[in-house]
Amino acid sequence: MNIALIGASGNVGSRLLQELSNRGHRVTAIARDPARIAALPGVAAVAGDADDVDALATQLRGHDAAISALRFDASDPRRLIDAVQRSAVPRYLVVGGAGSLEVAPGVALLDAPEFPPEYLEEARAGARFLELLRQEPTLDWTFLSPSALFLPGERTGSFRLGRDQLLADATGSRISYEDYAMAMVDEIERPAHRRQRFTVGY
């Protein structure tokens, strides 16, 4: 497939880029500084600004899907959604956050007393992004939330998928960037969560 990846040089974006390249997809890797994008088979690195709706729409046009792997508190979801819609890309996937996942009926992780205050702004911005997507009447979107602990690790291929509830096991709630990337690319190749949020964890 021909995939556009916005934020391709970041922690998650770089793992998505590696996974997409390993599986033989062609990727337009978009970042403010394309020099930071890894040189990989099938990857074309380009400079892009997520706040420039017209330019971003032009860069996204003609792809089979677009992925956004940007920090929520450093980007504008309305501009991103607008650019995707203008581009007519048939599918839009978002690297989501864990904060909006439920830890009890009607209780989001970000509202739990133990939620780290230094992550609240980013978590609330992610929850707003998800709500905006849910209000879109026709956009074919998918929002993949990681588990609570989201860090570099191993590509094991052993993980679980869920919907709106935080996944956890005896060791807590966690997922590696590498296994997260596997789950996202699986979803691109075999769509199972169109116009839905889902989550991945161990």
Image (tube, rainbow, N blue to C red):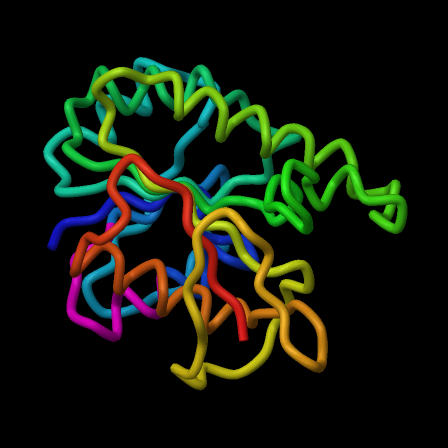
Number of numbered markers? 0
First to last magenta residue range: 17-27
Percent from the top left, x then y, of residue 25? 17, 62
Q: Is residue 102 above or below residue 84?
A: below
Q: Is residue 22 magenta?
A: yes
Percent from the top left, x then y, of residue 51? 48, 19
Picture quadrant where residue 167 is located? bottom right
Percent from the top left, x then y, of residue 52? 42, 17
Residue at the image point whose x is 57% and y is 70% from the top: 175
Extreme residue in the front direction: 105
Instruction: Report whether 112 appears left or right of 167.
Output: right
Q: Is residue 87 magenta?
A: no
Instruction: Report whether 186 appears left or right of 114.
Output: left
Residue at the image point whose x is 52% and y is 83% from the top: 154
Instruction: Report whether 151 appears left or right of 120.
Output: left
Percent from the top left, x then y, of residue 75? 56, 27
Between 199 and 14, which is closer to the camera in this rendering? 199
Q: Is residue 123 above or below residue 132?
A: below
Quarter occupied by the C terminus: bottom right
Residue at the image point whose x is 44% and y is 65% from the top: 15
Picture quadrant where residue 111 is located? top right
